[in-house]
Amino acid sequence: MRFTTYNKVNLIAAYYFLVGGFLLILAAGSILVPVSAVLLDASEFLARLPGWFLGTTLLIVGGALALLGTATLAIGWGLWQLKPWGRTWAMIAGVIQIPLVPIGTIAGGASLYLLLQDQTRDLFLA
């Protein structure tokens, strides 16, 4: 079976959906796990932290992961719907991913390679 350009774009969109979902799960876990550990008295270290510090840290980490996950899901949706902004943001994300060795390098490089081809550009303009 030979993949068409459309199928390759959908494969990259699926990657962004997978990464976005994983980031949202991490966002929820980064808030739920420490809070439940404090409430259940399972962590003496977390119990000694001031409440404002723990709450602020959880809010910043969870919020950043949720924002990143939502943006990644939006990129996947834009690619899946063949929106020109989806292609643009996927190329920006591909450049950002390249230093994330080894998965980001492979995924970022492959998405840039595909999205910069003339056939793919024409697919998003149609």
Image (cartoon, rainbow, N blue to C red):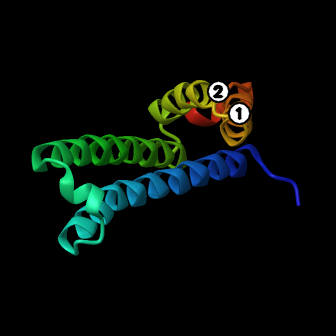
Instruction: Confirm whether residue 34 shows in the render.
Output: yes
Q: Picture coordinates of residue 89 (x, y %)?
A: 49, 30
Locate residue 98, reporting x and y percent: 66, 28
**Label 2: which residue?**
99
Q: Which residue is mark 1?
A: 105
Q: Residue at x 73, y 43 (%)?
A: 5
Return the mark for residue 94.
none
Tally of numbered tags: 2
Residue ID at (60%, 24%): 95
Foreground residue, 61 or 124?
Answer: 61
Please identify the quadrant where the C terminus is shown.
top right
What SS does tag 1 mark?
helix
Helix, strand or loop at mark 2: loop
Nearer the observer, 30 or 45: 45
Disc 2 marks a residue whose amino acid type is: Pro
Q: Residue furthest right?
A: 1
Q: Is residue 48 shown above or below 33?
A: above
* Residue 122 vertical position relative to residue 48 in the rendered view, above or below: above
Q: Residues within 10 Å of mark 2 (few under 14, many from 20)?
A: few
Eyeballing the image, is 29 above or below 112?
Answer: below
Residue drawn 45% across the image and 31% down it: 85
Residue depicted at x 54% and y 56%: 18
Task: Answer with the quarter of the image where residue 108 lies.
Answer: top right
Decide if residue 30 is on the left or right side of residue 80: left
Q: Are marks 1 and 2 in contact (CB under 8 Å)?
A: yes
Residue 126, visible in the rendered structure? no
> Would you call the spot at circle 1 few (<14 residues within 10 Å), some (14-19), or many (20 or more)?
some
Q: What percent of the width, then of the height, locates residue 72?
A: 45, 43
Q: Amino acid at mark 1?
A: Thr
